[in-house]
Structures are given as C-alpha cells and as structure tokens.
C-alpha cells in the first residue's frame, strides 16, 4: 500500500491531537508524520500512534518530501506557507479562514461537495459553525429547497482552542475563591456568563463569525439565493457547540419525512427520546464524530414551510479536525 508523508502545522494547538486521532481512525496510510509549530515548541517530543515525533519549527525548508499539509495554526501562517508547500508539490488542507472566500479555492465538506476538490492544491476547511449546520441542512435542501435560514449559535470556549478552555476553567476557579477574573481570550469574563459577540463586528451590525455562516453556506451549496441570518453567542462550555436553526423551505415539509432523511444521513445522530429527556447537548456531543440532532418540529411562524431543529457537535472534532482529515481521505481516493 502506498503511504503518504503528512505534516500537521500547529502542533501545540488543541486541534492537532484530534487530527492525529482522525488519521488513525480513518485508516489514512501515513508514511512519515511531521508536527510543526513555533520555535518555542520545537523539539518537544509528542507520542502518537505513528511513533514519538519531535515538533519542528515551521520554516520554508520543512515542506520538502511531503504529500499533504494540514494547516491548523491561523490565517497568517496559512497565507505565509501555503504557497511554499504547494511549490514543494504538497497538497494543502487549510483549517483557517485565509482561503475560504477565494473563488479559485474550493471550500469543502466531502459528503456535500467533495467533487469540487478535483486536482486542486489548496482546499479550505469551513468554519465549524457552518460545517455542522451544512451537514444537517444539505439533505433537507436537496429535497425541500431552502428560502430562509435563521440561526442562533451557542459556542464553546474551544473556539479559542486550548487557551480559551483554560480561561474558562481558570476563571471558574477564581469565581469560587472570590477573586477577580482574568480576561484575555474573550471580550468579557466567560465564567457563568454568555457573550453575544464572537469575532469582529462588521458594518452591517453582524460579527464576522455570523457572516461566515452566510458566506460559506452560499459557497458550499452553490446557491446565493438563500437568505441567512445568524446570531453567535459564546457560552461557558468547553468544546461542543450547539445551534438552534429555523428554516423556511420552498415546499411544505413533512416532519416524519425530515426525521427519516436525517436518520439516513451519514454523520448525523437523531437523539429523540424526549420521554427520557434525551436531546442534543454539549456534554453528550463531546468526543463524538457525529452531529446530534433533535427538537425537530414545524415552526409556527412559517407553518407548512417552516422547520425548526436543534443540533450539538464537538467543535474540535467534528467541526474542525475530522472534516479536514475527511478532505484528506477524499484527496487520497482521487489519486487512485
């Protein structure tokens, strides 16, 4: 079996460990695995299923003899090194927002638009909020069409990776000691609080995080006619996001059929026993590959063409690492 040399850039972040786990679980034929980050992290020894690996400092010289590069270190690093990697004949899968809105670069969820990858050398991984919603909405869109999407998100501190989760834990401890909170990763203290502000505010009053849902959903579905509005809220959970989604479809919806469609959708779990108070929640979704979905009902504003549902998913896993490695798997399959 042919094996591939892979480098994960961003080895000190919270996503890298999930990416390595996904490489193993998806049976990616790994030859050499490299981990890269900054000089302060270089030479740390990281145990992995592919052997103990020393973290290397990211520079122009380390992209030689690589087949694939998974960039998970932020937009500035992606913009600096993506072309360097491509010049060294590697395919780049980028987890940042650096290339998502470039018309010449595919923005991919493999089970939706994997064919867009083709022979492209840079492939963008969607924002986690968009990626999870799209997995659930796509099969509904195919059968019923979509006119409007109204979304409220409840996003964990893992959006800011390990430092964000650490800040939540640290300030929770400070609360019980009656000590003043330390605010670094977020605009306010996140412990015992919700913050209706994620990313920079735009001229239209939405934040960039909220507008990403519109921009990226349009690009992934190839349909700019859908009206989309999102409110993104930071909540004091560790690593699983949730969304309340209201839809207006183009034709009347059949709720039983919607349930059947989602039950048959790969990557989706229906958590549907309300008699036992079982429904999607961040605690249950943590560590799961699949998206949890329920609270499926007709929306009483849009009526026959109205649908409402609630989803939860692991932001680090399903919302970031897993989709990136699934893109990698699709690239490998395309080579066969």
Image (cartoon, helix red, strand yellow):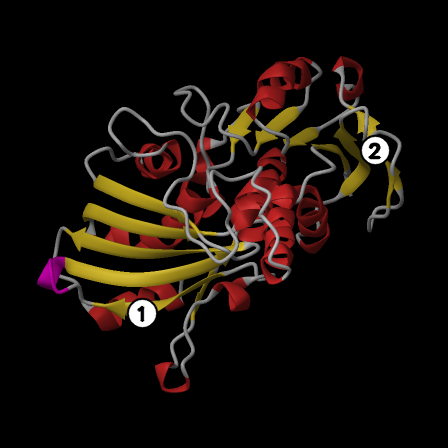
Residue 291 relative to residue 196: left or right: right
The circle drawn on residue 55 is 2
* 217 vs 55, nearest the viewer: 55
Residue 122 in sight from this viewpoint: yes
In terms of image quadrants, where is residue 116? top left
Across and down, in percent, residue 23 comes to 70, 47
**Residue farthest along the bottom direction in this orientation:** 275
Tag 2 or tag 1, which sits nearer the N-term? 2
Residue 112 position, x and y percent, is 41, 45
Q: Circle 1 — which element?
A: strand
- Answer whether residue 266 is visible to the viewer in this image: no
Mark 1 — residue? 295
Numbered label tally: 2
Residue 301 on the magenta span: yes
Label 2: element kind:
loop
In the picture, measured across the screen, residue 50 lies left or right of residue 7, that is right
In the image, is residue 187 part of the stretch drawn in magenta? no
Look at the image and tell me in which quarter the C terminus lies: top right
Distance, label 1 to label 2, CA atoms, is: 44 Å
Would you identify the image quadrant in which residue 130 lies? top left
Position of 259 relative to 55 (above/below): below
Tag 2: Cα neighbours inside 10 Å, few (<14), some, or many (≥20)?
many
Residue range corresponding to the magenta coloring: 300-305
Residue under the image location 26 percent in, 32 percent down = 205
Residue at screen point 36% across, 86% down: 275
Which residue, as the protein is rendered here, is positioned at the far front? 178
Locate residue 155, reporting x and y percent.
45, 50
- Disc assigned to residue 106: none
């Amino acid at each position: 079996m042919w094996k591939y040399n892979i480098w994960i850039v961003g080895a000190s972040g919270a996503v890298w460990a999930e990416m390595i786990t996904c490489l193993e679980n998806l049976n990616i034929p790994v030859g050499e695995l490299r981990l890269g980050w900054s000089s302060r992290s270089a030479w740390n020894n990281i145990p992995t299923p592919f052997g103990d690996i020393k973290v290397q400092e990211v520079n122009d010289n380390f992209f030689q003899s690589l087949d694939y590069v998974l960039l998970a270190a932020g937009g500035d690093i992606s913009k600096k090194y993506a072309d360097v990697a491509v010049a060294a004949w590697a395919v780049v899968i980028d987890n940042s927002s650096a290339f998502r809105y470039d018309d010449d670069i595919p923005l991919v969820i493999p089970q939706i638009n994997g064919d867009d990858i083709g022979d492209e050398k840079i492939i963008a991984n969607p924002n986690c909020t968009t990626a999870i919603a799209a997995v659930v909405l796509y099969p509904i869109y195919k059968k019923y069409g979509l006119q409007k999407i109204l979304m409220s998100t409840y996003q964990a501190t893992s959006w800011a990776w390990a430092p964000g989760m650490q800040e939540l834990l640290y300030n929770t401890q400070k609360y019980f000691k009656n000590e003043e909170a330390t605010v670094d990763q977020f605009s306010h203290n996140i412990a015992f609080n919700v913050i209706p502000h994620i990313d920079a505010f735009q001229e239209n009053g939405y934040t960039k995080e909220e507008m990403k849902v519109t921009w990226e959903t349009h690009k992934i579905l190839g349909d700019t006619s859908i009206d989309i509005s999102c409110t993104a809220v930071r909540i004091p959970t560790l690593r699983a996001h949730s969304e309340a989604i209201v839809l207006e479809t183009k034709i009347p919806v059949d709720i039983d059929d919607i349930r059947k469609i989602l039950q048959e959708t790969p990557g989706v779990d229906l958590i549907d026993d309300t008699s036992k108070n079982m429904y999607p929640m961040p605690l249950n979704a943590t560590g799961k590959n699949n998206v949890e979905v329920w609270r499926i009902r007709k929306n009483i504003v849009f009526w026959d063409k109205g649908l409402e549902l609630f989803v939860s998913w692991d932001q680090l896993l399903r919302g970031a690492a897993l989709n990136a490695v699934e893109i990698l798997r699709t690239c490998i399959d395309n080579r066969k």
